[in-house]
Image (cartoon, rainbow, N blue to C red):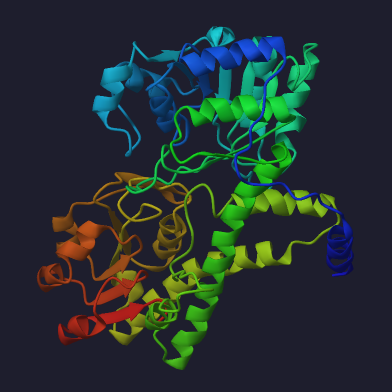
Amino acid sequence: MCFYTIGYRAFASLSVQETPLEDVNGMVKNSHLLETKSRIDSGDAKIGIIGLGYVGLPLAVAFCEKYVVFGYDSDEDKCKMLTKGKSYIDDIPDSSIKNLIGKRLKVISRESKLKECDAVIICVPTPLDVRGIPDLSYIAHSADIIRRVAGKGMLVVLESTSYPGTTEEYLGHAIKGVGLVPGVDVALAFSPERVDPGNKKFGIKNTPKVVGGVNEESTELAASLYGSIVEAGVVKVRDCKTAEATKIVENIFRGVNIALINELALIFEKMGIDTWEVVRAASTKPFAFMPHYPGPGVGGHCIPLDPLYLSYKAKQYGIVPRFIELSREVNEFMKNHTINLVMAAMDEAGMEPLDATVAVMGIAYKKNISDTRESPAAEIIEELSKRVGKVLVHDPLAKNIHTHRGDFKTSTMKTIMGDADCLVFVADHDEYIVQFPGAFKGSKAKVVIDTRNMFDAEILRRMGIKYRCIGK
């Protein structure tokens, strides 16, 4: 642990100039960049977006309100759907695509069309490889595209989450590789995405946008672009690294706090204390407390993956990020804990696991969306398929989920009610809360595992159902 102590002492001794977060007046002085700013301000700019996924497509639609947008994606199926006026993102209805496609929104298959753009924004995945190491191949490919299309006056922004230094390391290098100077010939910045799938309250327009460039002019130009569509305002920070670190901190904060409450849930279960009631009571404190809740593990692209980007980079600086890695271990263990609850409840009910059918209810990574990326349901399904006779899955929104044991397609509710001996609720979709516990009356199931505190234990027990809930 020596590196950890020395690393943090060294870090604490650095003198860091405080960067104000409030918006400040700036000025773009370079003639090429000034022309770009003029087109942005007038609404005549053309915006290119590389990557039309959960981040890129909503951003493209938002920019279409003011600009012509060129959307580029290597996934031909996505491009074909968009050209037909079809959306593959829950938060973007087909009607939005139909109204924009071919007009304000132009889906392009040739990257050379990006040369016409005043700004190019990169929204590509940043996964982990099989070893848990950051896979920056998508950013590297995007950097190659920038190398081929960049020209004087262009603004290049990376939104994909990565460790601090990525923007300059990949995109800055690509720009320099064609004889252009980042911040002088080409404005370069990082602006972390803050897309929350399924969130009806906060979207691109009413969520503040953080922007940091390689220099003041880059920051100002990026702020002008985002400020034209983000009503909540733009927060300008010192540089790209600061903006990159901001996104990492947001996700680590969530991951660490979820891990804390998950660990407390494990303790309180043994002590006979209701964790959910404890959190509700603690939440009445009007200061210095923010509620987080236990569950079967974390999912989505951000919380399970992004903290490991900083962990990877921190080790290169001789720092062992114990909080980050421990929180991941705790959150990962909750999947195993869910399995343990299933097996204990089935044993209590006198069931033979290999003769039982277990249904995993809710395969999306969170409520009321169809997104199954990094869903804890995948590993729960995999492990159950090794231990019980048959595994079924159901979700009112998601159609299937990929696991290392193969793809599992959702069954109908009728099939679930008629065949499943045990129901394991992983995602707390509103539809489940409305349907149950009334639907249990017509169900074969005698065991219910509740990972989200969806149901009243006493009601289910009076129905003769063996009920277990995480944190109770």
Residue at image point 45% right, 58% down: 376
Locate residue 32: give its quadrant. Answer: top right
Residue at image point 72% right, 14% down: 30
Q: Is residue 379 left or right of residue 342?
A: right
**Rendering coords of residue 153 (x, y %):** 66, 12
Residue at image point 70% right, 44% down: 242
Whether residue 247 is visible to the viewer of this picture, yes or no, is yes
**Rendering coords of residue 51 (x, y %):** 51, 27
User: Which of 10/431 is in front?
Assistant: 10
Determine the residue located farthest toward the left in the rendered image: 442
Image quadrant holding the C terminus, namely bottom left
Whether residue 131 is visible to the viewer of this picture, yes or no, is no
Q: Above or below — where is 369 with respect to 29?
A: below
Determine the residue located farthest toward the bottom in the rendered image: 271
Q: Above or below — where is 397 with respect to 33?
A: below
User: Which of 296/176 is in front?
Assistant: 176
Locate residue 458: give its quadrant. Answer: bottom left
Image quadrant holding the N terminus, namely bottom right
Q: Is residue 389 left or right of residue 235?
A: left
**Rendering coords of residue 160 (x, y %):** 59, 36
Residue at image point 34% right, 11% down: 103
**Rendering coords of residue 272 (x, y %):** 42, 92
Give the total of numbered labels: 0
Q: Is residue 91 left or right of residue 305?
A: left
User: Which of 121/53 is in front?
Assistant: 121
Q: Above or below — where is 140 with respect to 44?
A: below
